Image: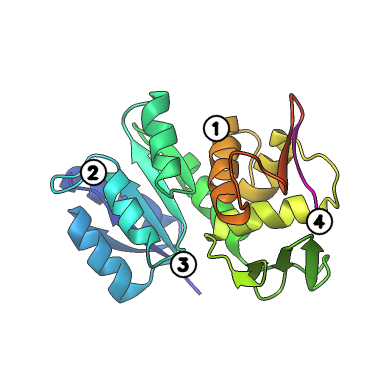
Amino acid sequence: MRRSVLLVEDDPRVRRVLRLALEDEGFEVAEAATGEEGLESCHDTGPDIVLLDLMLPDRDGFAVCRELRRTSTVPVIMVTARTDSHDVVGGLEAGADDYVTKPLVAKELTARIRALLRRVEPAMDRSPRRVDFGDLSIGLDDGVVLLGGVVVPLTRTEFRLLVELAVADGQICSRERLLDRVWGYGYFGDSRLVDVHVRRLRTKVERDPATPRHVVTARGLGYRLTA
C-alpha cells in the first residue's frame, strides 16, 4: 500500500518539485497552501505523515503543529529555511517529530520520511506486552501509557522514545542510540531531537517535570528509565 504525505507549503514551485520527487519515490501526495488548509486536509484525509513548512501566509508552522497536536498523533516533519537553534527547537517543542532545512535534497527527505514511518509503526515482537516502572505503566502492544492509572496521551515518536528507554530495563541509553532506534538514522544525527523530545515526554509522564523520577538524565551519557 502506498503511504500518503500531506505537503503544507505556500510556494507553488516548491510544492510541484516536492510532489514530483515524492511521487517518484512511491508516495501519494496531497497539497495545502496555508496552515488552515493543512489542518482541514489532515482532518479529512488522515495522511501517514505531514511535511509542514515553518513560514506560511496565514499562521506559522509552530501554531499549525500545536493545533494539530490537540487532536492527532500523525508524524510531522517541520521544514525550515533557517538552521537557527530557536527555530529548530521551537518546531520540535510545538510537537514536530523531526525537521529538515531548505534547500531540500529529495533523497535525504524521502530517507527521513521512510525512517520516521518505520519507527512509528507498532513492531514490538521482541518486547513483553506491558512493563511497569513504579506508577508508570507502558503497553507495548496497544500503545496505552498509564500514569497512576490515568491514560497519558503521547505522540507516536514520544511513545517510541519511551519504549526504547523501557526495553533498556534501567540501563543508560545514549543519545546516539536513541537517534538510531527512534528516528532510524545516526548519520543525520542531531542531539536536539532527543533532548527536546525528552523534555516533552517529561511533561506528560512526570508528576513534577522539573524533578523527574522516571526519565532520568545520566549527565554526559544519555537517559534511562527508572521506577
Q: Which residue is mark 1?
A: 192
Labelled pair 3, 4 in contact (Cβ < 8 Å): no
Q: Is residue 60 left or right of residue 186?
A: left
Question: Which numbered disc, 2 or 4, marks the residue that appears first in the sequence?
Answer: 2
Assess whether residue 129 is covered by the magenta stretch: no
Start and end of the magenta stretch? 222-227
Element at label 4: helix
The tag on residue 60 is 2
Q: Residue at x 54, y 49 (%)?
A: 203
Element type at marker 3? loop
Residue located 75% across and 67% down the image: 124
Give the image quarter of residue 174.
top right
Q: Say if residue 25 shows up in the picture.
A: yes
- Residue 167, numbered circle: 4
Crowding near the residue tagged with mark 2, few <14, some 14–19, many ≥20 C-alpha atoms within 10 Å? some
Alpha carbon of mark 2 to alpha carbon of mark 4: how far?
37 Å
Q: Can residue 19 be seen here?
A: no
Report helix, strand or loop for mark 1. Answer: helix
Identify the mark nearer the N-term, 3 or 2: 3
